[in-house]
Structure formats: C-alpha cells, structure tokens
Amino acid sequence: NAGVTQTPKFQVLKTGQSMTLQCAQDMNHEYMSWYRQDPGMGLRLIHYSVGAGITDQGEVPNGYNVSRSTTEDFPLRLLSAAPSQTSVYFCASSKTGPAYEQYFGPGTRLTVT
Amino acid sequence: QQPVQSPQAVILREGEDAVINCSSSKALYSVHWYRQKHGEAPVFLMILLKGGEQKGHDKISASFNEKKQQSSLYLTASQLSYSGTYFCGTEQVDSSYKLIFGSGTRLLVRP
C-alpha cells in the first residue's frame, strides 16, 4: 500500500493563479481531510469529507474548494492564490472519522508570490 | 475551538521525564496525540476516546480526564528520538467529524 500520496511536493504560484493539490489514498478510508500548517504553527483544518459526495468546511475554508467524487481522491482547489496561502498542506485519511488514527500524506509546500 | 497545549516548549536531558497537557473548554469525544519532526508529516501516537481511559506503549502514555476535558501525554525516560513537536487534536461532541489541533509543544531532548 502506498498509503496517502500528495502531488506536487513543491509548488510556486503567482498571486491570482489557481491550482489543484492532489491527494489520494489506497486504504479504502471513508474520511479524508485537508490541513494547512504555517511556519512554526499548528495544523488548521480546511475541509473534510466523510465519504464520496460529502464534504464540509473546517476552520479555515475561505479561498479553497474541495470535491470528493471517489473514495480514493480528495483534491483541494485554490481558486485565486494569495500570499496568505503560502503554507504546507497536508492531506489525511482515516477509516470513518476522527475517532480513528489519521494517516497523513507527506505534504505539499506551496509558495505564493 | 482550538485546544490549548502547555507548555509551549520543553528541553530535557536524555532519561528525564516530561508531561504535555491539552485542555478544551468544550466536551470532547476524542483526543489524539501526534509527533512531528522537522520537515515531516505528523505521526500518530495514540487516541483516547470519551470514557476517561489511559493508554500507553513503550515509555509514552496518555490519560484523558473527561470531567475536566483535559488530556496529558507522559514521556518517560526520554530518548533522543523523542525530540519533535507534539500536537494534540480534539473532536468535540457538538462538532463531530472535525479534528482540531492545538498549537503544539516543542520538545528537545539533549544527550
């Protein structure tokens, strides 16, 4: 099993550009989530999904969109990148929700100039 | 609502013990503990569910006081490999499926 994979590993965007961060898992997990981690800070929940077709907002959803068309994939879309979105983005998955161990992907380091 | 962790940072000598605390003003369903090393993803340590249990493996254990909505992580006879940032994550009873993390506790173990 590859676990949770994220692409790309690094990305540089210009202000106003849009892009999609990819996240995939091969563990048949129902629950997936996206976090951002600013330098020296904790993890903040952006969006989460409890299953295919079901998504909801976390703590800091503004500027981000998600969709979950399959169990395996949970892409995060930045609509119009801003310097404030410079961060490391982690995707995580678990069996059915936060009552289970979260498996984190390796992260995507995003810089917006 | 973000849980509060204390202390913010700890420096230990190898072999010493440490306690990291996590508290919430809201009723909790679960408390998670993760360790993150610099430049890496967080790694799961343990999870405690509503019911006030205590868990542990090797020399790391944790407790969850349901009445006080507090959890503590106990690191016994610390090893150099314990260095990193420790995060607690909480799922509130009235906000299920959202795992919210604290700001972290930096732990440095010196020889």
Image (cartoon, rainbow, N blue to C red):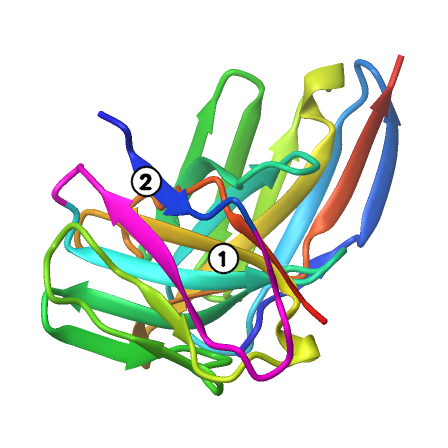
Point out which mark residue B65 bears.
none
Residue B38 visible in the shown view:
yes
Who's the residue at 66% across and 38% down the image? Answer: B39
| Amino acid type shown at disc 2 | Val
Image quadrant assignment for residue A96: bottom left
Q: What is the chain letter for disc 1?
A: B
Q: Nearer the viewer, mark 1 or mark 2?
A: 2
Q: Position of residue B4 (x, y in %)?
A: 66, 66
Q: CA distance from mark 1 to mark 2?
A: 19 Å
Q: Is residue A16 magenta?
A: yes
- Up the image or down, B66 lies above or below B15; here it is below
The structure residue drawn at horizontal position 75% and vertical position 33%, both measured from the top left corner, is B18
Q: Is residue A78 left or right of residue A50?
A: right
Question: In x, y percent, where is residue B36?
Answer: 61, 39
Residue at coordinates 50% horizontally, 47% vertically from top-left? Answer: A107
Q: Describe the element under mark 2 as helix, strand or loop.
A: strand
Q: Which mark is residue A4?
A: 2
Q: Residues within 10 Å of mark 1 (few under 14, many from 20)?
A: many
Range shown magenta: A11-28
Q: Is residue A4 left or right of residue A9?
A: left
Q: Chain of mark 2?
A: A
Residue A43 visible in rendering: no
| Magenta stretch holds residue A97 | no
In the rendered structure, the answer to whether residue B66 lies left or right of residue A83 reads left
Mark 1 lies on residue: B89
Is label 1 in a helix, a strand or a loop? strand
